[in-house]
């Protein structure tokens, strides 16, 4: 969690200087945790996929003979020549911008090490302390973000000014949607921690109901967790991120449906809670909320830069680089050539994580990522089904948060911010932790 806080404080990990200390810290955590990549059959396949993704990115960096490169990816040399205007020599990598791909490899390796270390660490315990620390970090992030937005809007932490006039910085992020991604992940797992705290009242003197809920919310820890959740929710609403709100609604529905054996009834409860959140968001910032809703429904002008425009140009990249892509982290560089509309602004992201993966990594990387997501969901489902301890609620929160970000990724690329990817890796470790709890922590749901 301290590593996640470091990446968050370093402007969301936007700059390259935090990556080396983050990689060193992740490597140390991995070694200290004693994680065994081949020890657990449930996650063994997922570990292979992660290793394959890392190997594929490394392959994009490997210099290849020009003849071989032109055979397996004919468009690479043409794009490189048009972009770099320099002769790269007889040997060229698949990536059109090797420094950007090296940065992407470092970020991906750091996230993988954090995931393996977190999974091993949470298998031994420590979830209560970790989630409480995350709640405090989330409270600080929310408080600072709201203060900065109120006193110095358009800046990043009062100190940096974004050159792009279209940018919407908020708190430690240059894009409010990326802040929304971080908040949705944190809110989901902190809410699971609050439910875990409440579960102890269901195992003894207290019974489920209003009285138990009041007691839980009234004690010291309940007040702290609830207060942190409120500040994070308020900050998420203040960002006016439509994709963030949709992601939060998805997290509510998924988390509620997983928390009860009667999934149908729980799903309806989740829908009702999601509707209540929409009403709350509209009440907190009625004018801004209405403006964002109306802008979503408005018909775009030919000059407007919408997601469909960006996606159309992205498909042109995918068509010319169908197998190996242009190189991880090179989307903006490819757009120097392939962008056909709104030339007054450069498309630095596809605003769709899945399309950007296909553009930068081709179908091979897209298959790897899709397979990894399916394996993660399958392993998390099995871990949740076998867990009857109070930790089950943290696991549910982690699953809900990851599902929410998968939904948000249809419109955004929030995981491109290293701070968000690191936090998502921690949640994945929580979801797949192989915990063995004493019988005294068993509960009936």
Image (cartoon, rainbow, N blue to C red):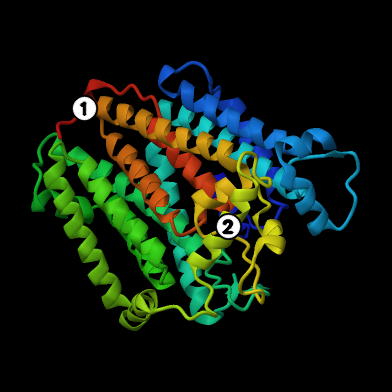
Judged by depth in the image, the label closer to the viewer, 2 or 1, is 2
* Lateral position of residue 86 relative to residue 288, left or right: right
**Alpha carbon separation for disc pair 2 and 1:** 50 Å
What residue is shown at x 23% (from left), y 71% (from top)?
279
Q: Residues within 10 Å of mark 1 (few under 14, many from 20)?
A: some
Q: Residues within 10 Å of mark 2 (few under 14, many from 20)?
A: many
* Lateral position of residue 334 relative to residue 118, left or right: right
Residue at the disc numbered 2: 314
Q: Position of residue 420 (x, y in %)?
A: 52, 51
Figure quadrant of residue 259: top left
Q: Is residue 34 above or below residue 393?
A: above
Q: Is residue 5 visible?
A: no
* Lateral position of residue 161 relative to residue 306, left or right: right
Q: Position of residue 303 (x, y in %)?
A: 55, 80
Q: Nearer the viewer, residue 368 or 90?
A: 90
Figure quadrant of residue 291: bottom left
Q: Position of residue 426 (x, y in %)?
A: 48, 40
**Disc on the earlier residue, 2 or 1:** 2
What residue is shown at x 37% (from left), y 69% (from top)?
237
What residue is shown at x 40% (from left), y 62% (from top)?
243
Q: Is residue 7 visible?
A: yes
Q: On the rendered image, what quadrant is the C terminus found in?
A: top left
């Amino acid at each position: 969690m301290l590593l996640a806080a470091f990446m968050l404080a370093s402007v969301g990990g936007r700059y390259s200087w935090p990556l080396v200390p983050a990689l060193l810290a992740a490597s140390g955590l991995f070694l200290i945790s004693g994680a065994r990549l081949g020890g657990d059959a449930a996650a063994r396949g997922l570990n292979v996929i992660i290793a394959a993704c890392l190997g594929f990115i490394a392959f994009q960096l490997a210099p290849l003979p020009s003849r071989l490169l032109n055979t397996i990816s004919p468009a690479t040399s043409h794009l490189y020549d048009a972009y770099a205007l320099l002769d790269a020599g007889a040997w060229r990598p698949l990536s059109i911008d090797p420094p950007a791909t090296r940065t992407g490899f470092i970020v991906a390796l750091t996230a993988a090490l954090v995931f393996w270390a977190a999974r091993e660490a949470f298998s031994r315990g420590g979830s209560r302390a970790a989630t409480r620390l995350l709640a405090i970090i989330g409270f600080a992030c929310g408080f600072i973000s709201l203060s900065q937005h109120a006193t110095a809007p358009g800046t990043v932490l009062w100190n940096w000014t974004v050159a792009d006039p279209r940018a919407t910085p908020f708190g430690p992020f240059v894009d409010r949607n990326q802040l929304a991604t971080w908040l949705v992940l944190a809110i989901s797992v902190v809410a699971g921690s609050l439910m875990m705290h409440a579960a102890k009242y269901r195992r003894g003197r207290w019974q489920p109901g209003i009285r138990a809920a009041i007691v839980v919310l009234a004690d010291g820890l309940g007040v702290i967790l609830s207060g942190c959740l409120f500040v994070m929710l308020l900050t998420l609403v203040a960002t006016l991120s439509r994709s963030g709100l949709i992601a939060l609604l998805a997290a509510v529905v998924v988390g509620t449906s997983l928390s009860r054996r009667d999934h149908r009834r729980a799903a309806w409860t989740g829908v009702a809670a999601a509707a209540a959140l929409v009403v709350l968001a509209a009440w907190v910032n009625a004018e801004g909320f209405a403006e964002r809703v109306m802008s979503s429904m408005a018909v775009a002008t030919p000059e407007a830069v919408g997601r469909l425009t960006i996606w159309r140009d992205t498909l042109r990249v995918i068509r010319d680089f169908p197998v190996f892509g242009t190189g991880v982290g090179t989307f903006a560089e490819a757009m120097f050539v392939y962008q056909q509309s709104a030339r007054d602004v450069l498309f630095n992201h596809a605003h769709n994580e899945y399309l950007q993966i296909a553009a930068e990594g081709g179908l091979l990387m897209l298959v790897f990522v899709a397979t990894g997501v399916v394996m993660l969901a399958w392993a998390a489902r099995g871990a949740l089904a076998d867990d009857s301890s109070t930790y089950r609620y943290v696991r549910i929160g982690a699953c809900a948060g990851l599902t929410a970000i998968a939904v948000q990724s249809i419109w955004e690329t929030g995981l491109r911010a290293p701070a968000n990817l690191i936090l998502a890796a921690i949640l994945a470790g929580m979801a797949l932790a192989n915990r063995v709890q004493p019988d005294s922590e068993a509960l009936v749901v």
